[in-house]
Image (cartoon, coloured by chain):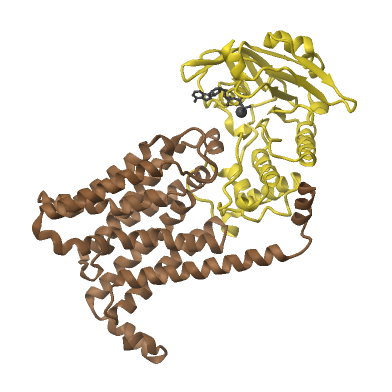
Amino acid sequence: MSGFSIGGLDLVGDVEHLLSYHFMLNALRAGTIVAVLAGAIGYFMVLRRQSFAGHTLAVIGFPGAAGATWLGLSASLGYYGFCLAGALAIAALPAAGRLTAGLGGYGDESAVIGTVQAFALACGFLFVSLYKGFLSGLTGLLFGSITGVSDGQVLALLVAGAGCLLALLALGRPLLFSSIDSDVARARGVPVRLVGTAFLLVLAVAAAGASQITGSLLVFALLVTPAATASRLTARPLPGLLLSVLIAVAVTWLGEGIAFYSPYPIGFWVTTLAFSSFLLATGYRHGIDRLGRRRPATPRGERRGEVAA
Amino acid sequence: MSEQLPDAGPPAEVLELAGVTVRAGGRVIFSDVSLRVRPGEFVAVLGPNGVGKSTLLKAVLGLLPIADGRIRVLGAEPGRHNSRIGYLPQRRAFDPATRIRGVDVVRMGWDGDRWGVALPGRLGGRAGRQARDRVHEVIALVGAEGYATRPIGQLSGGEQQRLLIAQALIRRPDLLVLDEPLDSLDVTNQAAVSALVQTVCRSHGVAVLLVAHDVNPILPYLDQVIYLAHGGAVMGPPEQVITSDTLSMLYGTAVDVLRDRTGRLVVVGQPDSHAEHRS
Ligand SMILES: Nc1ncnc2c1ncn2[C@@H]1O[C@H](COP(=O)(O)OP(=O)(O)OP(=O)(O)O)[C@@H](O)[C@H]1O
Ligand SMILES: [Mg+2]
């Protein structure tokens, strides 16, 4: 615990020491890719109110991997297969593409998704108990083993991640438009349903690729927390997205650094740092909003009085 | 940014419906509706709840197939020229937690349907500057400068409505299709938004098709009204259509149109759609 708390002069030395280990270098590489991906995709996920769908896609890889391992297939196959199938299933729910979807997001699909998620998790535990020798890998499946990442895994993650980011870049404006106002977007010729499905597939690929390395739970923490934090700090789309990525990368690097010098797992540190930033941002937002409300006789205040009168 | 196509001179009719029937969920919503809107005309669509006013607008936008009849929008099939139509759907308000600024919502009307992302600030070059100027222009036009940079979820219903009208106007449309834009506004704002739509209609020559529940705020501005009923529809100048005789004939039951001292019209005895289903 000594290294990180001293700061100052020692910090440089500590970082150098940390980077001298190849496994730590790979952990940082993988963590960075996951953080950039999760920060960017998470921004849209939070905007679309699809956090629950995102959570499902993040954990659904677990039964996939457990099942694949039990059948003697590669765990990777299980992750991607289950996540992609899950994304298509969620996209096929009538609520996700209904003609008069709510303004600013979606919401009614959660009951069905929750049902599927619970069932998928139950299957995962069944597979784990069927495949007796697998049990030691259970925590790895849920919480990841980022310190055991091979060069090949980093490369695979990089390819999947680059593909996801390119797809997100291409979807760009229509994705934002249909997330905020699907009715008008559809009238303007945006293929809203297709865009929604494509987004879920991107989310699935990112979740599958990332949860193999960081574990399902950490992926979800990185998907939702930095984005929720960023949206409390700014209401501008592009700065919001970049801020979300920045926060995700920062908490990942810090978390990995701290974990190297402490006996506690990376997942705990990253999640705790992300959660702290979220609390700070929420406090900041409340403060700003309260200040704004106390300011007397704004034009808006006058209009309000008029409505009430 | 060629919102004005070179070959697209002003068509004789912005909108033309002839004998249109729409079916949904296995039943006829309305049948044999005919309607014409010329450039720069202000037309109101009226009728009781559930009669198919919103459905009519969706058919005009090509979002719903029609079972019978013919629709021409800006001289083409519905859905072909939707980028030249400003649409405001019937709606509830934005969720209070929606953290996107009003200006961003307005901007979506400009290029939100294009793939990829827009480069921010100076990187956007001339096109980016043009887009930003136009955003400011329409926000000023609807009088939303005071709150356009606040998150839209925190704005009042009337403020949101103005920003959405700005979004509908941003591409300089030839036709505005507004579904109950006066809903959820107080009397003052109803008058203000009505006057705004009138201004856009008259000074910019934009044809307006507007669904309303209460005709009174827009009555002085209207060129035509169309009254919908399940059997069909009548269209004409308001003083000819909103009369006891015409509406009684349309709904097949005694309907009274009363006028109070201030000139407001009150329609009494108009059946709601459920009563009509039973008969
Ligand atoms: N997709 C659909 N499937 C089945 N029925 C539908 C569908 N869409 C609309 N309807 C029905 O069509 C009728 C007309 O609906 P519409 O929304 O057009 O009414 P409206 O005149 O706009 O009513 P309001 O004044 O309440 O807005 C209603 O009875 C509605 O239930
Ligand atoms: Mg309606």
- Comparing A305 with A59, the one in front is A305
| Quadrant of the snapshot with the N terminus of chain A | bottom left
Depicted A183 relative to depicted A171: above or below: above
- Comparing B24 with A164, the one in front is B24
Q: Position of residue B167 (x, y in %)?
A: 64, 42
Q: Position of residue A100 (x, y in %)?
A: 52, 34
Q: Position of residue B236 (x, y in %)?
A: 75, 15
Position of B126 with respect to A4 (left or right) is: right
The residue shown at (45%, 71%) is A276
Outermost residue, right side: B261
Depicted B230 relative to depicted A177: above or below: above
The residue shown at (49%, 59%) is A241
- Comparing A130 with A267, the one in front is A130
The residue shown at (25%, 81%) is A20
Outermost residue, bottom side: A9
Q: Is residue B138 visible?
A: yes
Q: Is residue A74 visible?
A: no
Q: Colour of chain B?
A: yellow
Position of A117 with respect to B250 (left or right) is: left
Q: Position of residue A16 (x, y in %)?
A: 31, 84
Q: How many numbered marks appear? A: 0
The residue shown at (43%, 52%) is A45
Q: Quadrant of residue B245?
A: top right
**Rendered-image quarter of ligand 2:** top right
The chain coloured brown is A
Q: Quadrant of residue A97?
A: top left
